[in-house]
């Protein structure tokens, strides 16, 4: 059998070998310890950073925007418009973390002078311990640790249509403010129409910032559901009819707002027969009323269980209400657990359940199939339905 080009291949290989040998001979005897790839990876994914608050600005009547810069003055890691950061709060001897969508644009985090990221935090109508703290107590000069650039809620041109309609409610406008700024800066190639639902004009967050970046590719439509006689814009809710009015034939929908809005919008988009691949939901945090979810065992809803928490050789026993996530029970007991999204998505709070049973919020069940099989839960989305024994990493 004759193999075509065989000799040429063999001699070709020997030429490469010779070239390599002469390169070795010419090389410096001092080992090259530089590792540009690892350096780039460290710069882009530096882990937790020391951050300082450099400005606190009221945003509308109900929210504040915090500007954060790195304590060492360096640029922040690269992130996508729509992603969030995680801030750690040391309160009453315990460290708790909260995710916040970044409301400033990625290009602002890479400025030569004073690169920054901003978050906008609204005072909730009830039970907003951390949000109240941010609104009442945080001031310029305060220091935090934080993780910048997390989450999957960003525009991906290979997956999403160029025409994007954002459906926002309340402080859910923040990721879209980041996208709008990035588009206006010419560093994000998409067309964005934001349908922003608020009860009253006083509730509108980041209005000036959105007005400032409105342009041919960024359109902001305010929709008021409250009774405001002088209001000139759209009224009512983000109904199928209204969404259709502002949609192109091929549109991707991005949704961010309170939990109740998601349920409503799912039905409205169903009426428009929007395929699932064209709808992106931002995670909405821990479920407000877990007992209202289908499948939650109602007989345990008023019960308090005990959780045996194993960290290495240490074991603590803490109380846990059936309607509070395992993360909440741990933080209440002063036990640190890593968290990011607090919505079951990121897996930071992955926890092994050794004994006992839990209810996992079906909306927030972001576990891998193997984790389900081997008894792992995401503690921010899991609720005890019996006494438990769990294992978490030592922090
Ligand atoms: S904090 Fe992200 S999955 Fe629990």
Image: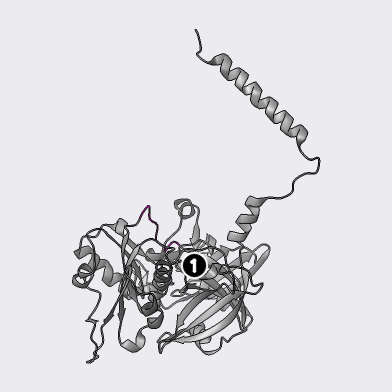
Residue 164 appears in which quarter of the rendering? bottom left
Q: Position of residue 132 (x, y in %)?
A: 49, 86
Q: Position of residue 157 (x, y in %)?
A: 38, 55
- The reply to whether the magenta stretch includes residue 267 is no
Q: Position of residue 136 (x, y in %)?
A: 52, 90
Above or below, 165 against 55 in this view is above
Q: Nearer the viewer, residue 308 or 266?
A: 266
Above or below, 263 against 372 in this view is below
Mainly helix, strand or loop, the magenta region?
A: loop
Q: Position of residue 113 (x, y in %)?
A: 59, 73
The quarter of the image holding the C terminus is: bottom right
Magenta span? 152-159
Q: Residue furthest right?
A: 29
Above or below, 366 against 214 in this view is above
Q: Residue at x 27, y 67 (%)?
A: 266
Residue ID for mark 1: 106
Q: Nearer the viewer, residue 75 or 321?
A: 75
Do we see residue 193 in this rendering?
A: yes
- Marks counted in the figure total 1
């Amino acid at each position: 059998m004759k193999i075509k080009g065989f000799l040429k291949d063999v001699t070709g290989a020997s030429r490469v070998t010779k070239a390599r040998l002469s390169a070795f001979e010419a090389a410096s005897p001092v080992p090259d310890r530089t590792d540009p790839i690892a350096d780039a990876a460290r710069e882009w994914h530096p882990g937790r950073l020391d951050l300082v608050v450099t400005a606190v600005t009221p945003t509308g009547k109900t929210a504040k925007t915090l500007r954060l810069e790195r304590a060492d003055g360096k640029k922040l890691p690269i992130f996508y418009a729509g992603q969030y950061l995680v801030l750690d709060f040391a309160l009453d001897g315990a460290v708790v973390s909260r995710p916040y969508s970044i409301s400033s644009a990625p290009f602002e985090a890479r400025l030569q002078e004073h690169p920054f990221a901003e978050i906008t935090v609204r005072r909730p109508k009830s039970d907003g311990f951390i949000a109240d703290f941010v609104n009442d107590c945080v001031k310029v000069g305060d220091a935090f640790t934080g993780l910048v650039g997390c989450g999957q809620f960003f525009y991906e041109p290979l997956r999403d249509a160029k025409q994007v309609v954002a459906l926002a409610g309340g402080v859910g406008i923040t990721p879209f403010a980041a996208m709008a700024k990035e588009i206006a800066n010419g560093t994000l190639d998409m067309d964005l129409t934001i349908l922003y639902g608020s009860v009253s004009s006083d509730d509108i967050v980041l209005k000036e910032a959105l007005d400032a970046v409105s342009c041919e590719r960024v359109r902001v439509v305010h929709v008021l559901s409250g009774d405001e006689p002088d209001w000139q814009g759209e009224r009512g809710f983000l109904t199928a009819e209204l969404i259709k009015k502002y949609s192109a034939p091929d549109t991707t929908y991005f949704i961010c707002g309170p939990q109740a809005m998601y349920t409503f919008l799912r039905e409205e988009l169903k009426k428009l027969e929007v395929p699932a691949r064209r709808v992106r939901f931002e995670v909405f945090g821990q479920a407000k009323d877990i007992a209202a979810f289908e499948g939650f065992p109602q007989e345990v809803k008023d019960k308090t269980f005990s959780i045996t928490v194993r960290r290495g050789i240490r074991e603590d026993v803490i109380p846990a209400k059936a309607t509070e996530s395992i993360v909440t029970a741990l933080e209440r007991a002063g036990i640190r657990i890593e968290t990011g999204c607090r919505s079951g998505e990121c897996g930071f709070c992955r926890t092994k359940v050794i004994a006992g049973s839990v209810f996992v919020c079906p909306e927030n069940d972001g576990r891998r199939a193997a984790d389900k099989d081997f008894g792992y839960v995401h503690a921010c989305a899991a609720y005890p339905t019996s006494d438990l024994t769990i294992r978490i990493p030592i922090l």
